[in-house]
Amino acid sequence: MAKAGRPALAVDFVGGATGYKLRTGAARSHALLKATGMAPGRTLTVIDATAGLGRDSFLLAAMGATVTLIERSPQVHALLTEGLEAARAESSELAVIVARMTLLHGDARELLPTLQADVVTVDPMHPERTKTALVKQEMRLLREIVGTDPDVTELMQAALAARCGRVVLKWPLRAEPLQGVRKPSYQIVGKTVRYDVFVEAY
């Protein structure tokens, strides 16, 4: 429950930035699509190992991917469930997108060995900024619920061992590479984040 005077955290796939990108077509130019290998006529299966507020998963599903979302926080999992139900009830167009999304509750390190997909995406809680503007309010609220991700190296190692074709790590643009994780095959750089892409040869 949110403290008095503080807005509650919510998952909204209908309005806000997510809905805007879907309505305007802006989602089609998102760097995540390039990082995951999405292309017209290519249908991917994706595991979002750190679902969070679900926006990346919804974007991928909107572009035609079949996405399995993994969230280990009970509170955030409940918010995702509510957000998906609301989107499903909003319109037949959104219901089609939601139908391509499967939400799981659990630790991705344990679930990844039991799943198969073309791509695994990892977007852990990023290190707190020290020299830039304050993180958005909703990100601060999310951090209060889930804390940090001290086991991100273990999660990446599990993702890289999952025998999928590609692993994508979303990480702050200027952050140091994760210790204990091999060098990515290449990077896709945005304004504030980068996507470290690990291509597997199976």
Image: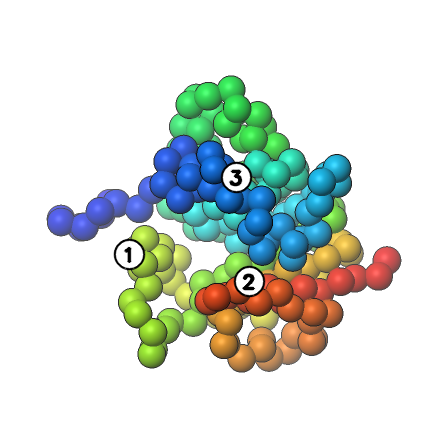
Q: Which amino acid type corresponds to the residue marked 1 in the rendered image?
A: Gln
Instruction: Check disc 3 and report its element: helix, strand or loop.
Output: loop
The residue tagged 1 is 137
The type of residue carrying mark 3 is Gly
User: In terms of sequence position, does the residue under pointer 2 or pointer 3 come before the other?
Assistant: 3
Residue sitting at 51 percent across and 71 percent down?
Answer: 173
- Element assignment for label 1: helix
The residue beneath circle 2 is 170
Residue 196 sits above or below residue 106 on the image: below
From the viewer's perspective, tell me whether residue 28 is left or right of residue 129: right
* Residue 17 pos. (x, y %): 40, 44
Give the residue number, with chain letter if any, for mark 3.
Answer: 25
Apparent side of residue 155 relative to residue 22 in the rendered image (left or right): right
- Which residue is drawn at the image coordinates 58% and 56% (left, top)? 31
Q: List the single residue furthest toward the left.
A: 4
User: How many tags in the picture?
Assistant: 3
Q: Residue 179 at what x, y percent from top left?
A: 60, 79
Q: Secondary structure at mark 2?
A: strand
Q: 102 or 39, which is in the foreground? A: 39
* Mark 1 Cα shell of 10 Å, populated few (<14), some (14-19), many (≥20): few
> Quarter of the image containing the N terminus?
top left
- Give the mark nearer the N terminus: 1 vs 3: 3
Q: Quadrant of residue 135?
A: bottom left
Quote the CA–CA distance across marks 2 and 3.
Answer: 22 Å
Residue 117 visible in the displayed image: yes
**116 shown above or below 163:** above
Point out the residue furthest to the right here.
Answer: 202
